[in-house]
Structure formats: structure tokens, C-alpha cells
Image: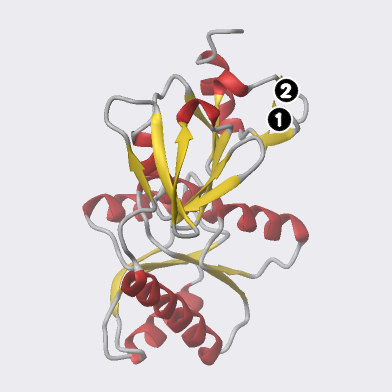
């Protein structure tokens, strides 16, 4: 590819990391950093950020690759390609919840790694080329937003929103009887909302606490009418402590 990108490798197997490093150089990309543990990975990312991270699921340090990816995606918009030798359903489900750009299993060929990397950058390039202003605008001084859909501007009262769901570079806005897909990051959307009313329950979900009917603590879900929204262990205490009605 003519354009060069900075790629970070987080891998604790020396032979595998050497293989990926050689493949990156062969493709004409720049090695941003090569680390074998979560602590060093976070230290490198605090200095600067790469265009892509090749992340092994099992790494040394305080966090495994999936936990590290969750932390990274909360703070930075960096695509992550998981590398794993685990084929079990549990690992697949954990990885899927992160919504990574892709996942390849060991052992893999040079061409498999090459195509996975190229697909990610091709997708990102298309997103950048088609990116326009967000499909949502905010009404000054009112609890109202206007969402563009099907060539129309739809007026939506913020209090009518039940929950938000992150969908890559988009956000799904869920009402009682319909939903809108808007081109804006969850981080940018939530910054416009009242943090006491809209609270995070999971990396992908933010709920309107005024719409909560109950919280199923045993199954870790928030119930909004017929909608069941997952609650992660990391967000459960913040949610419970922030609910004035409890």
C-alpha cells in the first residue's frame, strides 16, 4: 500500500512478534512499538497513539489483551486486530463484546495477516472519505435534538431517549417505538447530555436513568420497559451510586 501507517504490536511470544514485525516492514508500514505486556503498552500509548494495534489475547502484565483493549477503546479511537491461539467459545464471546476490527487465530500465514491489516485500513479510508458532519444537531437552550434520517430532520426530545448503543463510529438512539442510527461517536454524543440522567452501564451502552423500571442485580441487566440492557461489573457500582431514586 502506498500510504504508511504506524502499527503497534502487543505480543509476548518472541517468535510471533518477530514474524509480525517483519510483515509490517514488508508491507511498508512503521513499527510504532513492540511490547509484551499491558503495562508497557499503556505507557507507550500515553506518549502517542498508533494507527493500528495488533493485540494478543494472552499477554503479561496487570491485564490480559481483552481487558487492555477495553481500556484503550474507552480513551482512544484506535482499531484493534486481535491475535489469539484460543479457539474456545468463551474467548470468542469476550472478544466479540469489544467489537474489534478483526481477529485472526494462530498459526496464521503471512498473507492472512497482510489481508487482515489491509482490510482494516481500506475500511478506515472509506469511512474517512465518506465522513460528513454528524447526523444529529442540538437545539440551543432546549432538551431537543434533530436527527437526520431518510432525508428528513426528526425532532427528538432528549427525555424520550431510552438508551444509546455504540455501533462502531455510530450511535444507535433507542426510543420506545423506533431507533435512529447517527454518525457520531458515543463519547461526543454523551458529552452533550446530563451525566446525572444518562449513565453508562457498559462500554457500549448508556441509559436514561429516568426510564429505568428495575435493575436485575443477579443477571446484571437494567430493565427499561421491555428492553434489557447489560451492566458490566466495572460500571455497576457507578450506576448504583448515581441513582437518586434508590
Single out the residue that lies furthest toward the left: 47
What residue is drawn where x is 31% and y is 34%?
Answer: 139
Q: Nearer the viewer, residue 224 or 237?
A: 224
Name the disc covering residue 217, or none: 2
Kindly indicate the quadrant of the structure image that contains residue 107: bottom right
Instruction: For label 2, count other residues whose C-alpha is less than 10 Å away and answer few (under 14), some (14-19) or many (20+).
Output: few
Instruction: For label 1, count other residues whose C-alpha is less than 10 Å away and answer few (under 14), some (14-19) or many (20+).
Output: some
Q: Specify whether 67 is left or right of 87.
A: left
Q: Is the C terminus in the top left, top right, bottom left or bottom right quadrant?
A: top right
User: Helix, strand, or loop for circle 2?
Assistant: loop
Kindly indicate the quadrant of the structure image that contains residue 196: top left
Task: State the colouring used for the structure image.
Answer: secondary structure
Q: Specify whether 21 is left or right of 67.
A: left
Q: Which residue is mark 1?
A: 220
What residue is drawn where x is 77% and y is 25%?
Answer: 218
Q: Nearer the viewer, residue 176 or 189?
A: 176
Q: Residue 205: horizontal and vertical position, in percent?
A: 55, 39
Name the disc covering residue 186, or none: none
Q: Is residue 229 above or below residue 39?
A: above
Total numbered circles: 2
> Marks 1 and 2, how far apart in space?
5 Å
User: Helix, strand, or loop for circle 1?
Assistant: loop
Disc 1 to disc 2: CB gap under 8 Å: yes
Amino acid at each position: 500500500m502506498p500510504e504508511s501507517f504506524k502499527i503497534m504490536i502487543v505480543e509476548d511470544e518472541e517468535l510471533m512478534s518477530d514474524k509480525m514485525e517483519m510483515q509490517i516492514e514488508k508491507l511498508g508500514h512503521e513499527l510504532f512499538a513492540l511490547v509484551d505486556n499491558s503495562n508497557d503498552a499503556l505507557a507507550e500509548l500515553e506518549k502517542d497513539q498508533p494507527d493500528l494495534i495488533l493485540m494478543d489475547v494472552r499477554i503479561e502484565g496487570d491485564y490480559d489483551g481483552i481487558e487492555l483493549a477495553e481500556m484503550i477503546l474507552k480513551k482512544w479511537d484506535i482499531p484493534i486486530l486481535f491475535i489469539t491461539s484460543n479457539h474456545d467459545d468463551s474467548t470468542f464471546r469476550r472478544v466479540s463484546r469489544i467489537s474489534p476490527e478483526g481477529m485472526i487465530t494462530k498459526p496464521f500465514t503471512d498473507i492472512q495477516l497482510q489481508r487482515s491489516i489491509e482490510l482494516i485500513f481500506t475500511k478506515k479510508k472509506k469511512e474517512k472519505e465518506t465522513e460528513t458532519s454528524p447526523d444529529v444537531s442540538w437545539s440551543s437552550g432546549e432538551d431537543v435534538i434533530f436527527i437526520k434520517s431518510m432525508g428528513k430532520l426528526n425532532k427528538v426530545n432528549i427525555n424520550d431517549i431510552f438508551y444509546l448503543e455504540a455501533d462502531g463510529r455510530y450511535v444507535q438512539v433507542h426510543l420506545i417505538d423506533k431507533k435512529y442510527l447517527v454518525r457520531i461517536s458515543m463519547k461526543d454524543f454523551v458529552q452533550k447530555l446530563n451525566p446525572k440522567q444518562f449513565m453508562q452501564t457498559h462500554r457500549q451502552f448508556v441509559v436514561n436513568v429516568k426510564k429505568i423500571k428495575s435493575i436485575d442485580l443477579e443477571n446484571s441487566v437494567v430493565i427499561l420497559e421491555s428492553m434489557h440492557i447489560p451492566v458490566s461489573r466495572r460500571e455497576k457500582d457507578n450506576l448504583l451510586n448515581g441513582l437518586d431514586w434508590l
